[in-house]
């Protein structure tokens, strides 16, 4: 995760605790989680809209899915 180890994360969390306090940190975490979730949802909506409006995008998405399935099948066979 960005080259950060456990000691660095502990220091960052300790500083955040000192700056924001114990009562505010859960609120900040919840807000951050909701923001990330909303961002991912927006990306999915844009992707879905692009699939419907851009010519050939459905075919590209279908080919991508098929290639992923074939890759997974090959990985299963190579492990055996």
Image (cartoon, grey):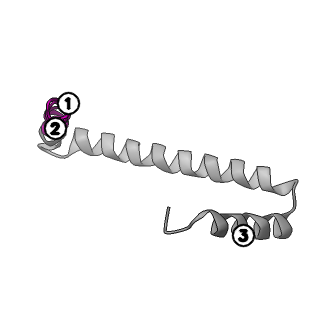
**Image coordinates for residue 7, horizontal then vertical, percent:** 66, 67
- Give the image quarter of residue 73: top left
Spatial CA span between label 3 and label 1: 42 Å
Asked if the residue under mark 3 is in contact with the one under mark 2, i.e. CB atoms within 8 Å, the reply is: no
**Image coordinates for residue 75, horizontal then vertical, percent:** 19, 36
Q: Nearer the viewer, residue 79 or 34?
A: 79
Please state if 49 lies on the left or on the right of 54 as rendered.
Answer: right
Secondary structure under badge 1? Answer: helix
- Please tell me which residue is depicted at 12% across the width and 38% down the height of the picture: 63
> Of marks 3 and 1, which one's residue comes earlier in the chain?
3
Which residue, given by chain and number where applicable, does mark 1 sit on? 76
Which region of the structure is painted magenta? 62-80
- Please tell me which residue is depicted at 59% across the width and 51% down the height of the picture: 35
Q: Residues within 10 Å of mark 1 (few under 14, many from 20)?
A: few
Which residue, given by chain and number where applicable, does mark 2 sit on? 71
Asked if the residue under mark 1 is in contact with the one under mark 2, i.e. CB atoms within 8 Å, the reply is: no
- Please tell me which residue is depicted at 82% across the width and 63% down the height of the picture: 17
Secondary structure under badge 3? Answer: helix
Residue 28 lies within the magenta run: no
Secondary structure under badge 2? Answer: helix
In the image, residue 4 sits, relative to residue 25, either above or below, namely below
Q: Which mark is residue 34?
A: none
Please state if 65 lies on the left or on the right of 31 as rendered.
Answer: left
- Give the image quarter of residue 20: bottom right
> Of marks 2 and 1, which one's residue comes earlier in the chain?
2
Q: Which mark is residue 11?
A: 3
- Please tell me which residue is depicted at 87% across the width and 62% down the height of the picture: 21
**Image coordinates for residue 26, horizontal then vertical, percent:** 78, 50
Spatial CA span between label 2 and label 3: 41 Å
């Amino acid at each position: 995760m960005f080259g950060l180890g456990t000691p660095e994360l502990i220091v960052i969390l300790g500083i955040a605790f000192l700056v924001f306090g114990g009562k505010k940190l859960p609120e900040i975490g919840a807000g951050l989680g909701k923001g990330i979730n909303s961002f991912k949802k927006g990306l999915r909506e844009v992707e879905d809209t692009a699939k419907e409006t851009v010519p050939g995008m459905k075919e590209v998405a279908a080919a991508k899915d098929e290639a992923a399935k074939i890759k997974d099948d090959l990985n299963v066979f190579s492990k055996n």
